[in-house]
Image (cartoon, rainbow, N blue to C red):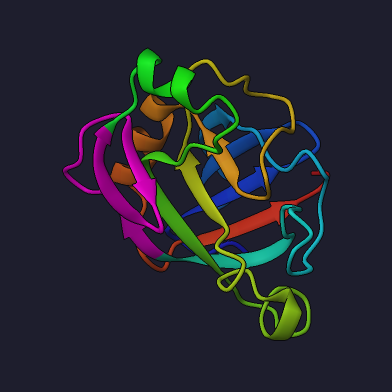
Amino acid sequence: MPPATEWILVDLGWQRLHLMHRSRILDTFPISSSARGAGERLGSEQTPRGRHRIRLAIGAGCPTNTVFVGRRPTGEVLTPELASQYPARDWILTRILWLTGLEPGINRGGTLDTLRRYIYLHGCPDAEPMGVPRSHGCIRMRNHDILDLFERVGIGTLVEIKEEI
């Protein structure tokens, strides 16, 4: 099943993202997926399962902690002062790897479409805990980890999201 090139395996049960080469783990990163568990429905705020690909890679060249809104850099860089002004904000920082589903009726099309749900791998404030589900559906990563991953994968990279491995 895995392609001969690098691919990503996300383990929601252990809250880990594995960068793979064939069946070998190259690297492992802690993540934070949805606080509402796994699911594919539009509006559910759950993390979608199944086979995906990276559709777009956004943020190359932006500084660490760049704030994104609507997939565009706002010109802001997250600081403790900015974070304290908006304590409930779901920060999308540093880099975005936007996913598209590959399985019609599961994570592609209609109300199950990962791309239309704006599901990303992205950076978040360093104060946010990793290893526990806390996101609104996306897969959050530490900023240094998303920078590392962003340099090692690209558009078209396969992403498999599973509840248990």
**Which residue: 55% across, 35% down?**
89
Is residue 154 at all visible to an observer of this figure? no
* Residue 73 part of the magenta segment: yes
**Which residue: 63% across, 19% down?**
129
Q: Quadrant of residue 64?
A: top left
Q: Quadrant of residue 25?
A: top right
| Picture coordinates of residue 54, whole percent (x, y) | 46, 63
Q: Quadrant of the C terminus?
A: top right
Residue nearer the viewer, 22 or 126:
126
| Picture coordinates of residue 40, whole percent (x, y) | 77, 66
* Residue 120 part of the magenta segment: no
| Picture coordinates of residue 138, whole percent (x, y) | 61, 49
As drawn, 36 above or below 2? above
Q: Seen in the image, is 26 located left or right of residue 153?
A: right
Is residue 28 at all visible to an observer of this figure? yes
| Picture coordinates of residue 55, whole percent (x, y) | 43, 69
